[in-house]
Amino acid sequence: MSVPSDRAALMWDVQQFVFREARLQDDHEYAAWDELWTDDGVYWIPANTADGTEVDPEREMSILYDNRSRIRLRVKQLLTGRRHTQEPKSQLRRIIGNIEILSVDEPDVRVGANSIIFESSIRDDTTWAARNEYVLRYGEDGLRMAYKKVTLANNNRAIFTLSFLV
């Protein structure tokens, strides 16, 4: 499947993908979320970048920096039900907005979006704000996620527990 030449059709595909990913995360549908990834996927949550500077995740600390095998392992751990910080599971709802198509380089589409995540857990209620960057790739079965970077607005402060998929 190739990138639609119609910009409106492309935006529709992108929005539906991003909204679906958010729903799967909120509903703790880990196996379905795992299926959204390409085989070379990278999931990154940088640390200490609130001032907008770029960091190299290979050389500097990150909150999370997973390749595809590490993403699968993270999902397997969540599926065990033995993550003490997720027992009981956090109630999650997120709002995704400001979705932009940043560039198209067939078959990849670079996308930006903002997100607000509300987490209600046994500890407390927490609101997380982030800028997400994606590389979505068209394949035979439609869009899949090759890259996701989540830059939390407060990533330069102590983050006590981030034990769900952002």
Image (cartoon, rainbow, N blue to C red):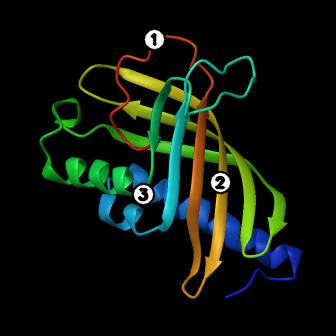
Going 84% across and 74% down the picture, which residue do you hit?
Answer: 8
C-alpha span from label 1 to label 3? 26 Å
Which residue carries the number 3 mark?
Answer: 68
- Mark 3 vs 2, N-terminal side: 3
> Does 161 sit above or below residue 14?
above
Give the mark, 1 or 3, whose residue is nearer the N terminus: 3
Q: Give the foreground label among 1 and 3.
A: 3
Report x, y in % for residue 114. 68, 41
The residue pinned by badge 1 equals 158
Q: Quadrant of residue 14?
A: bottom right
Element marked by disc 2? strand
In the picture, which quadrant includes the N terminus?
A: bottom right
Decide: few, some or many residues near mark 3? Use Cα within 10 Å; few <14, some 14-19, many ≥20. Answer: some
Q: CA distance from mark 2 to mark 1?
A: 25 Å
- Residue type, numbered disc 2: Tyr
Residue drawn at point x = 15 percent, y = 31 percent: 84
Q: Is residue 17 left or right of residue 100?
A: left
Crowding near the residue tagged with mark 2, few <14, some 14–19, many ≥20 C-alpha atoms within 10 Å: many
How far across and down, in percent of the image, does residue 55 sit?
A: 66, 27
Query: Badge 1 local density, few (<14 within 10 Å), some, or many (20+)?
Result: few
Identify the disc placed on residue 134: 2
Q: Residue furthest top?
A: 157
